[in-house]
Image (tube, rainbow, N blue to C red):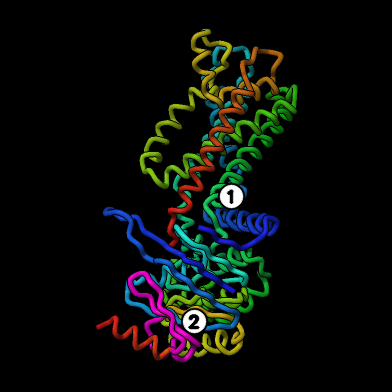
Amino acid sequence: MIELVDVSKFYQTRRGSKPVLEGINLKVTPGERLGILGRNGAGKSTLIRLIGGVESFQRGQINRTMTVSWPLAFAGGFHYALTGLDNLRFICRIYNVDIARATGFVSEFSELGLYLDEPIRHYSAGMRARLAFAISMAIEFDCFLIDEVVAVGDPRFHVRCNYELFEKRSDRAKIIVSHDVNFIRAHCSRAVVLLDGKLYHFDEIDDAYRFYDQTLQ
Amino acid sequence: MRDTDASLLESVAVQARVIKALFIREVLTRFGRHNIGFLWIFVEPMLFTLGVTALWTAIGASHGSSLPIAAFALTGYSSVLLWRNMPSRCIGAVLPNLSLMVHRNVKLIDIFLSRLILEAGGATMSFILLGIVFTTIGLINPPEDLLKIVGAWLMIAWFGAGLATLLGAWAEEFEIVEKLWHPASYLLFPLSGAAFLVDILPKQAQDIILYLPMVHGVELLREGYFGTVFVAHYDMAYMATCNAVLTFFGLVQVRRTARKIVPV
């Protein structure tokens, strides 16, 4: 389980400290699929990064009793001067995963072929997304954090992602940030909405969307 | 803020894995797989020391003593490489690793430690290899007291690591640290005891120069190598105190800085 208890985060700006997240309470149980909605700048990515343990926060507590992936996003997680394979090996060492087995899976799934031996800085956003996604599938987490990343690939990549993530790993928890209504509706069992630093919980996705739509008016 | 994850034992295992992964990643981006690859770790400092030894020998820089110049240069310049390269590599260490910090077990202290191990390892291998080569070809006599050398070397390494941790973490908050370190490291070299023996200085100058912690380490190192031919001046308790203070404030600053880092 992942549990956030009364978590608050502030950013220091030139005009004093600005609250980004205030008193967030959230529980994610094994196998649960949670969608996070919110306008640009509402703090969705910040929240998913707090859950992933990437950023610090000032108040509250986060408990993790299941393994949680790093936030799979457009950028980050790679060293751009290293090749795809060297990045894969680095991540395998960190998470204690057999390199040979992961390499087989990643080269098969990412379909990057010879590019795996090229530095990441030469990759397109789509290629990076494919690599990031493939590596995270090779490592096996109890909970995957997905920050829009699935959105960048082509349709073939979508199909393969959906199969790996939502069919083969249907028992894992997922926390997904996306603007795509259909994506959240198809893959999440419930949704929360971030508005002005506060988190609003909804049991029904449609209720969450109705609320989210109102905030856009 | 509380962020609970693992027991202490698990944490140690995780940290060891992370440091190893970062170490390999450092070696790859710094030396690559071309020509002699990772051997540059110690070939690079060896070339420095060899060059300085050759220069000092050529101009007959006996630095006011009857010591063999090769032994003088080997002990002096190797110790400079040891304490001076560690801060240089820790300042600005965050930016190239920032994107890797989205893996939550990659912490600021791990980035510093992996670079410290790399620098200390390279300087140590270079020192040992050159010592063996110089002794074998008869350029210098074998060390008189190996234990003193090991102790002095560890103390200089500790000094470098403490200074590097403090400056590296400071530099993330204050840009001026990086600007000031370049001239400071340059000016500290001639003052560090690498190019002179404390004993040849006037008493007044000795008292001042011995405020610098690394001077004590270099003096002990030389006493270990050829202690019977000169009088060494050192106070290892003073150096240990300085090292401990640097390390303490270094770790405090690492904690402060780590909370402010936002990986991208």
Q: Is residue B61 magenta?
A: no
**Which chain is mark 1 on?**
B
Q: Which residues are magenta?
A: A178-204
User: Residue at the spot x=50%, y=60% of the render?
Assistant: B101
User: Residue at the spot x=70%, y=23% of the render?
Assistant: B224
Spot occupied by residue B37 in the image (x, y as percentages of width and height): 59, 53
Residue B48 visible in this rendered orientation of the protein = no
B90 versus A2 height, above or below? above
Going by the image, does B240 lie left or right of A201? right
User: Residue at the spot x=43%, y=59% of the render?
Assistant: B262
Within-10-Å neighbours for mark 1: few <14, some 14–19, many 20+: many
A205 versus B125 height, above or below? below
Q: Is residue A183 magenta?
A: yes
Q: Secondary structure at mark 2?
A: strand
Q: Quadrant of residue A199?
A: bottom left
Which residue is label 2 attached to? Answer: A34
Of residues A214 and B64, the one drawn nearer to the viewer in this rendering: A214
Spot occupied by residue A98 in the image (x, y as percentages of width and height): 68, 70
- The numbered dot on residue B114 is 1
Measure how far apart labels 1 and 2 are at the Cα level. Answer: 37 Å
How many marks on residues? 2
Of residues A12 and B130, the one drawn nearer to the viewer in this rendering: A12
